[in-house]
Image (tube, rainbow, N blue to C red):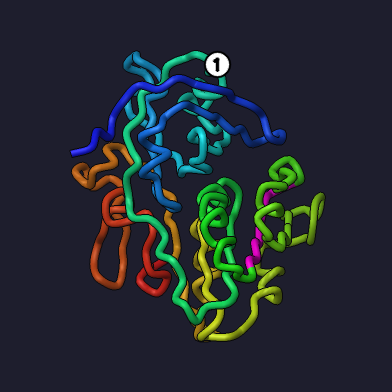
Amino acid sequence: MSKIQDIYKVVSNEKLCPKFYRLCFDAPSIVKTAQPGQFIHIRVDQGLEPFFRRPFCVYRAKKYVEIFYEVVGLGTKILSEKKKGDDIDVVGPVGTPFSLPAKEVKTVVMIGGGIGVAPFLPFTDILKKRKLELILLYGGRTKDYVFNMKEFKSNGCKVHITTDDGSAGTKGRIDKLFSKIPIDSEKTFVYTCGPTPMMAAVQKFTQQHGLRGEGSCEEVMACALGACLGCSIKTTKGFKTVCYDGPVFDLDELIF
């Protein structure tokens, strides 16, 4: 059995925009096995506080592993202070990844809100090889939540941005961008990750137009093994854990 917990060295930790950071660490074993949509579980400090690990989607896994995060509490504040050469204790990769679109699909639409954009970059690394039309719809609260997204663009993504206050991109919630989605039940597939209200809006739109899709859920995960049941969510097939059964689910399966 391959080892899923180890200590790795931080390579870099940079601020991408006022609200988001990118941490890079040297983990060849994760680079080899990580799939888009999976996550890693990081123990940010060796002390008792914070006690639980923190989950982060794999933002990229090429030479090094990268995570994309926002400082929202003690755990991520400690993480933001990590420097080159520091050790981090990581479990992963774990979780159910995105499935690849069927052969008949010609357009892939990725819809991310805030930190929910994270799992889509490694996905575009794979999808670009299939010469699909790639569309990224991104929603942030303000311009402080918007970064240049040059890596998405270099992978051929058409990037559309909205902010709640209009300080960057289109003003309003992300549903203002749904007109960018080609309505074709056979050739268009939708992937989404972000706040629950946003994902609920995406689900409503796809169901109204007969589109298929997958959603990656964001929940607090204490164990990442499906044991504590703390990240359980309601689905059409009963309660499931985001860490073990997900984080990726068929979009129609989710109940918001």
Question: At x 78% / y 60%, what residue is drawn?
Answer: 171
- Verify whether residue 141 appears in magenta: yes
Question: At x 36% / y 34%, what residue is drawn?
Answer: 29
Could you tell me residue 32's position as x and y percent?
39, 41
Query: Is residue 194 in view?
Result: no
Q: In the rendered structure, which amino acid carries the disc numbered 1?
A: Lys
Q: Quadrant of residue 87?
A: top left
Could you tell me residue 22's position as x and y percent?
59, 33
Q: Is residue 121 above or below residue 157?
A: above
Query: Is residue 171 in view?
Result: yes
Q: Which residue is mark 1?
A: 84
Front residue of 255/18: it is 18
- Verify whether residue 104 appears in magenta: no
Boundaries of the magenta span: 134-142
Q: Is residue 56 above or below residue 241?
A: above
Could you tell me residue 174's position as x and y percent?
66, 63
